[in-house]
Amino acid sequence: MTIPRSMPRLTVLGAGVIGLSCAWRAAAAGLTVTVLDPAPASGASWVAGGMLAPVTEAWPGEEELLELGSASVRRWPGFAEELSAAAGRPAGLRTEGTVVAATGAGDRAELDTLAGYLARLGREVERLSGRELRRLEPALGPDVRGGLAVPGDLAVDNRLLLAALRAAAERAGVTFVDRAARAVLDDGSRVTGVRTDGPDVDAELVLVSAGAHSAALHPALDGLVRPVKGEILRLAHRPGAFPPPTRTVRALVDGRPVYAVPRDSGGLVIGATQAETGFDTEVTVGGVRDLLRDAERVLPGIAEYALVESAAGLRPGSPDNLPLVGAVGPDGLFSATGHGRNGILLAPVTADAVLALLRGEPVPEPVRAADPHRFAAAVTARR
Ligand code: GLY
């Protein structure tokens, strides 16, 4: 259904993967869309590894997040195809799947627990010995003693994705304004505009999708989104070095998680640390040391690769690890933020939900758990 021309204008605050996906979808459906961001397609979306991994990110007690992630990963192939056609460039999807590797006995026990939990939920995971894993991925080293194959957990080159989203959004008529939003303005009951670091912008509909910076933009989001730092490394294969894996490799090394996400170029993205140190994007010596040490235990060949980039991003963490997708505060204000470790995975289902909200239609079933009104006291009392 196309949104009628009489629909109000939408202002999107934040041009990361969530803001861009929502802006593209809304503009393609007929809305007049403006995106405010001082540095579009940067931040956590730029730094990310790009795993689309509802199963291997799953955690007992977070079944609603698993459902939401599964709904989104199912959308990914169609989303990527449509995006690529709309943008005229590749969306960067990789469908080779994921393996999870364990090193020590404690790591194997932890993976057994995860495999048992996932099997009880009916998820597609296959337990494999170290030898079976190495047959699938010869890049895995002898310290890998066993693990899992999870073919349904995919990956995307986040930087190709961002370029495609920006191109598709521009082709759909989205206007980009390279200014920071400072606050959403309202008259107590309705949104009236956005304060920026330039002139104020009138707005009738506002979507806050500013990642870790979202909480500062309206009192209704105050305290509901916090920065969770992640450091990441980018490696490039060099001639003569052992070839990289074709699947995403996730591993536990003496209890520490590490992952390596292959790129079509032969590169690898190694991630990621996790720390709650506020708005801190410095890369630490300890972070780089831990990532390289653990990744090399699992993929010994990377010692011959070039280290081409280190970076830190701020995941937008929420109190319960589910995002905040829905109406908040005064009429006309919506949020699509708090996606934590899963922003890129959840982009397609979030964009579908935001489009439904803008049309006044019900959101897809698994997105209901992400309604910000689960923090009702905060969302309504702080109008
Ligand atoms: N989704 C992986 C991470 O946040 O590091």
Image (cartoon, rainbow, N blue to C red):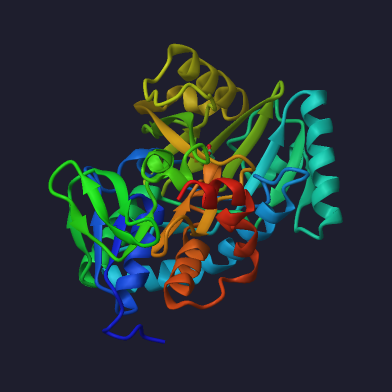
Q: How many circles with numbers are drawn on the protein?
A: 0
Is 311 rendered above or below residue 99?
A: above
Q: Nearer the viewer, residue 277 or 193?
A: 193
* Picture quadrant where residue 44 is located: top left
Position of the N terminus, as image quadrant, is: bottom left
Residue 258 visible (yes or no): yes
Q: Nearer the viewer, residue 101 or 276?
A: 276
Percent of width and height locating residue 13 = 31, 52
Residue that lies at the very extreme toward the left in this rendered image = 199
Residue shown at 83% from the left, 47% from the top: 117
Is 295 rendered above or below residue 89?
A: above
Percent of width and height locating residue 225 = 50, 40
Percent of width and height locating residue 106 = 81, 24
Percent of width and height locating residue 320 = 64, 43
Residue shown at 42% from the left, 15% from the top: 284
Q: Nearer the viewer, residue 173 or 197?
A: 197
Residue 246 visible (yes or no): no
Residue shown at 86% from the left, 55% from the top: 120
Left or right: 315 as drawn, with respect to 17: right
Residue shown at 78% from the left, 44% from the top: 60
* Picture quadrant where residue 368 is located: bottom right
